[in-house]
Image: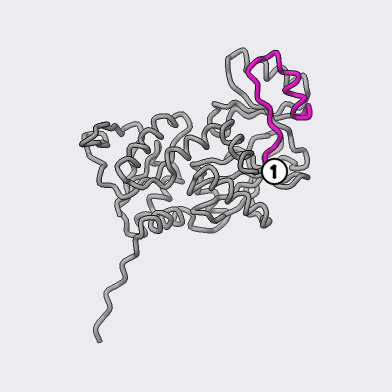
Amino acid sequence: MRIGLLASNPELPSNQRILEAGEERGHRIRFYDIRQCYMKLDAEHPEIHYRGGRLLNKLDAVVPRIRPDLTFYGCALVRQFESLGIFSLNSAEAISHSRDKLYSLQHLLQQGLPIPTTGFADSPLDTDELIDMVNGAPMIVKLLEGPQRRGVVLAESRTAGESLINAFKSLQANLLVQEYIKEADGKSLRLLVIDGKVVCAVERQGIPGQFRHHKQQSRLLAARISADERKLAIKAAKSIGLKVAGVDILRSRKGPLILEVTSSPALDDLEEVCGKDLAGAMISAIEKQLGWKRKLATPVNR
């Protein structure tokens, strides 16, 4: 098969692993920088080109790994591939929905899936009531447009929360305020779902003094998960429409709560902890979708 990896940085370990996995399985897989792709919208001859004029219309499938700041253009590009009948491992619609933090939380609730209590307001005049909605301090303040793993702050006191909210509001930034789950003790689960199955589960523990789990600022350990946590991750990915998803879960007294569903989860650190070929599982999902069967070796006549 001819597969295109749509991303921004060919040197990223996760992207390298996907390229390796595709080649190991005998496919022609190439990296294409999203920003170097351009498209022709035309009723009779729609096209997608890569820098230098190379035509990409003959690809069998694409694997989108879209950076948060390229969501708009990246999703437009994936939609163009889909309109040409080229399979995308994650659809443009699903990626777009996963990147809209407010929409995805509302959608998860509509599907009956649990999340931490969350408040959203437009006016700074509502700051006090917003804080009360999430049971006061400590609380989590999240920028809706924040890049991945950024724009998330723990406000340990009511005063700190008010200052943060009002400062962000003065910059016309949209934000969520979320209850702090004390019993989680700064830990969260990352479950990787590929094609309707949880293929890896890790526990992330932030280093002392750090709240948000950044790759360089957290410790990953293989995690044993419950049947409820497994089902919740699978349902969350399916409800957003993602074939590949990282589902972040908090363990609370009320049971597991979904923090976030991401469409471009890092693979390399998860592979290292879980000891599994996760990039290969992504390629296998494409093979299954397109009905591709590995060629068997020619039998030797005896």
Q: Residue at x 21, y 36 (%)?
A: 44
Per the image, the residue denoted by label 1 is 187
Q: Residue at x 69, y 43 (%)?
A: 187
Magenta stretch: residue 237 in it? no
The spot of residue 79 in percent (x, y) is 37, 37
Q: Residue at x 63, y 41 (%)?
A: 218
- Outermost residue, bottom side: 302
Q: Nearer the viewer, residue 217 or 176?
A: 176
Q: How many numbered discs sit on the rendered protein?
A: 1
- Packing grade of label 1 (10 A; few <14, some 14-19, many >=20) is many
Q: Is residue 243 left or right of residue 8?
A: right
What's drawn in magenta, residue-wise? 114-138
Judging from the image, the colouring scheme is: one colour
Quarter holding the C terminus is bottom left
Q: Is residue 54 above or below residue 168?
A: below
Q: Residue at x 24, y 32 (%)?
A: 42
User: Circle 1 — which element?
Assistant: strand
Q: Is residue 121 above or below residue 16?
A: above
The spot of residue 227 in percent (x, y) is 67, 57
The spot of residue 225 in percent (x, y) is 67, 55
Three-letter code, disc 1? Lys
Q: Is residue 97 left or right of residue 53?
A: right
Q: Nearer the viewer, residue 93 or 271?
A: 93
Query: Dividing the picture into quarters, in which one does residue 299 lie?
Result: bottom left
The spot of residue 256 in percent (x, y) is 70, 47
Query: Dividing the picture into quarters, in which one does residue 280 lie?
Result: bottom left
Quarter holding the N terminus is bottom left
